[in-house]
Image (cartoon, rainbow, N blue to C red):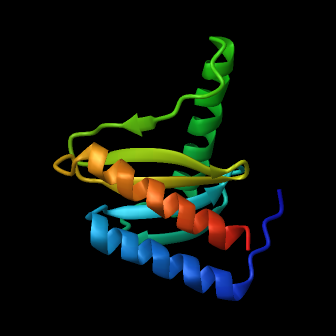
């Protein structure tokens, strides 16, 4: 997929992502296409963003195939819990995936509510 996004949309999405980071307490947010190409990001990063994007897209695709195998449409939540960092995955559009990193002390439920609102904002911007 070739993703072309206008410069004004890039600026708006990056502001929305940074506001999400500031308000939610999440560590990092990444938006990537399903091919694993990073599109937007905000927050602290001390890792290879390209690798995170590629592995996240592959992880999501693998999980989708597991869902198909057991006759599920998809799993509504894709989440990995770690000792120092948690990862939440959300499909924003058929071609776009959002990855949010956050510390274990943050409430997953509250973060998911904020992510749902963020998804709506990002979708509206990307599709405009």
User: Seen in the image, is 74 located left or right of residue 6?
Assistant: left
Q: Quadrant of the C terminus?
A: bottom right
Residue at 38% in and 67% down: 45
Q: How many marks?
A: 0
Residue at 43% in and 56% down: 115
| Residue 44 appears in the rendering | no
Q: Nearer the viewer, residue 9 or 45?
A: 9
The image position of residue 79, as x and y in percent, is: 41, 37
The image position of residue 75, as x and y in percent, is: 54, 29
Residue at 28% in and 51% down: 110
Residue ranking furthest to the top: 70
Residue ranking furthest to the left: 105
Q: Quadrant of the N terminus?
A: bottom right
| Residue 1 appears in the rendering | yes
Q: Nearer the viewer, residue 128 or 26?
A: 128
User: Seen in the image, is 105 located left or right of residue 73?
Assistant: left
The image position of residue 47, as x and y in percent, is: 41, 61
Relative to residue 18, is residue 31 depicted above or below? above
The image position of residue 71, as x and y in percent, is: 66, 13
User: Seen in the image, is 79 located left or right of residue 26?
Assistant: right
Q: Nearer the viewer, residue 76 or 97?
A: 76
Residue at 55% in and 68% down: 121
């Amino acid at each position: 997929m070739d993703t072309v996004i206008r410069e004004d949309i890039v600026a708006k999405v990056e502001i929305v992502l940074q506001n999400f980071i500031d308000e939610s307490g999440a560590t990092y947010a990444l938006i990537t296409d399903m091919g694993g190409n990073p599109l937007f990001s905000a927050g602290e990063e001390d890792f290879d963003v390209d690798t995170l994007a590629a592995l996240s897209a592959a992880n999501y695709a693998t999980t989708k195939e597991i869902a198909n195998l057991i006759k599920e449409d998809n799993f509504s939540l894709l989440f990995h819990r770690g000792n120092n960092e948690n990862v939440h995955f959300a499909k924003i559009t058929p071609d776009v995936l959002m990855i949010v990193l956050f510390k274990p002390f943050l409430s997953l439920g509250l973060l998911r509510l904020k992510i749902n609102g963020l998804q709506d904002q990002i979708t509206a911007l990307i599709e405009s």
